[in-house]
Amino acid sequence: MKKTSTRLADGRELIYYDLRDDVVRDAVDRRPLERTVTTAEIRRDALLGDSVAVASHRQGRTYLPPADECPLCPSRDGRLSEIPDSTYDVVVFENRFPSLAGDSGRCEVVCFTSDHDASFADLAEEQAGLVLDAWTDRTAELSHLPGVRQVFCFENRGQEIGVTLGHPHGQIYAYPFTTPRTTLMLRSLAVHKEATGGENLFDAVLEQEMAGPRVVLQGEHWVAFVPYAAHWPYEIHLYPRRRVPDLLALGEEARTEFPKVYLELLRRFDRIFGEGEPPTPYIAAWHQAPFGTLAEFEGVTRGDFALHLELFTIRRTSGKLKFLAGSESGMNVFINDVPPEAAAQRLREVASS
């Protein structure tokens, strides 16, 4: 992998990740952009104990432009975009309309390919491996920024999910706090460790799932399953067999196998509902341990956390979506229309031949 860092016209950082070492990246952003001004701030909810990002400047962000005006395509044929060069493998840049900025963290965009009409599932294994390298590198770099507590790499795919740009891409959020979902996991880890005399909850869950009916796919170094208490109609959790806290600690053999396993899962997602259906909307979310000490979670260390990826769709059946209605939105109590065992069976049925 070759990494080349540059700056856009308004001062934002942009990094090219190339498969070949002989690639030269010297294109200059010629757009007349003024320096980005953001209004992002973090407000803490005193009753719930969580944090909310308020970012009013995002009201003006680009929304579903036509393909010939896509800001994530390379700059070519006289049309200037967020990427100055005429082609790229993988590129990462600071979001022009960030949810988090300055003392409130940082947001980055990850473009998986220069092909506007592709999806992650269309990538070759080598290209998918390069995306994993980019996620890992950005996790390392962002973790060293002042105040950053947790790094979250994720992809939203599909207008039903809320995507505002059709080009295949994901995002990375660097939060200045431990997110509520991770906080719940760490609390459960601490309670379980205390109650069992030191047993790791992630290890116990993985062992139980591997022996049950919800395993979807197993590799030598990765295991994918539908969790016992899945929140979403079709939800897969992907774990490395050897517990590590983050992408930085992932072993070379697991890194090598990841593209094959992950691409197979994504391709199965697009076959869940049968031929003729539009691409399945999904969210793919990496869960990594927060950086720094975990003193607030008694007895828990970073090494107790298990890196994993959660992949899920809000489509519950052909032509119908799972909406977060009263119970989910009002009380955070999910009601799943698809039994996890049935979801796992369906995901096994649509395996590549």
Image (cartoon, grey):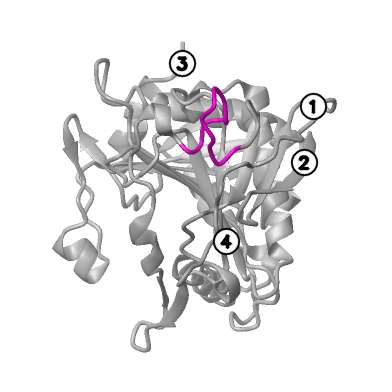
- Mark 4 — residue? 35
Q: Are marks 4 and 3 in contact (CB under 8 Å)?
A: no
The x and y percentages for residue 207 are 55, 48
On the image, which quarter does residue 4 sit in? top right
Amino acid type at mark 2: Thr
Q: Residue at x 55, y 52 (%)?
A: 33
Comes first in the chain, label 2 or label 3 = 2
The percent coordinates of residue 272 (x first, y second) are 31, 26
Which residue corresponds to mark 2? 4
Q: Is residue 321 magenta?
A: no
Asked if residue 196 lies left or right of residue 67, the reply is: right
Closer to the chain start, of discs 4 and 2, is 2
The amino acid marked with disc number 1 is: Val
Name the residue carrying label 1. Answer: 23
Please state which amino acid type lies under the numbered disc 3: Ser
Crowding at dot 2, Cα within 10 Å, few <14 / some 14-19 / many 20+, comes out as some
Q: Are marks 4 and 2 in contact (CB under 8 Å)?
A: no
Q: Secondary structure beneath disc 4?
A: loop
Quick one: SS at disc 1?
A: loop
Q: Nearer the viewer, residue 264 or 217?
A: 264
Regarding mark 2 in the picture, which secondary structure is present there? strand
Q: Position of residue 308 (x, y in %)?
A: 56, 49
**Image: magenta residue range:** 71-83
- What residue type is disc 4 on? Arg
Q: CA distance from mark 4 to mark 2?
A: 22 Å
What residue is at 33 percent from the left and 45 percent from the top? Answer: 63
